[in-house]
Image (tube, rainbow, N blue to C red):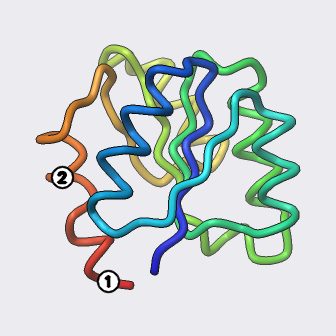
Amino acid sequence: MQRLMIADDSDVVRKVGKRILSGMGFLVSEAANGLEALARCQTELPNIIIVDAALDGALDLIGNIRRLPEGKSVRIYYCVVEADLKKMMAGKRAGADDFLLKPFDRKILTNVFASLSIAA
């Protein structure tokens, strides 16, 4: 089973994402801030992480995950509210693999993550 973490300061976003992604077969954990997310990653590194761009220290979190012993193998999605090229490029430079637009719903998450849940 693929492990996925949602790092977002919004309780609602984490809960909705967790409900949808758990239903797709992911083992989902949550983090409300960058420090909590990094601490969880140091304990058990997920296969996939969704990092909200508005999270305090989001870019630092991505960089710190990449520096962990197995951090290069994690698939990191940088979650942005709009297709802001400047913000997206900063996420890419920090080490994000891909982007996810917010707000997301079941259809968007299914389109993005269905093939990854099967790949487990």
Image location of residue 20, percent across then percent down:
29, 46
Q: Quadrant of residue 7?
A: top right
Residue at position x 48%, y 18% in the image: 86
Seen in the picture, residue 21 relative to 13 is either above or below; the reply is below
How many numbered discs, if any?
Answer: 2
Kindly state the secondary structure of the residue where label 2 is placed.
Answer: helix
Residue at position x 56%, y 23% in the image: 53
Which residue is at the front of the view, 63 or 30?
30
Q: Of the residues shown, which amino acid type is indicated by label 2? A: Thr
Q: Which residue is mark 1?
A: 119
Looking at the image, residue 34 sits to the left or right of residue 73; the answer is right
- Image quarter where the N terminus lies is bottom left
Image location of residue 91, percent across then percent down:
56, 35
Q: Which residue is mark 2?
A: 110
Seen in the picture, residue 33 relative to 2 is either above or below; the reply is above
Residue at position x 88%, y 50% in the image: 39
Mark earlier in primary sequence (2, 1) = 2
Q: Residue furthest bottom?
A: 120
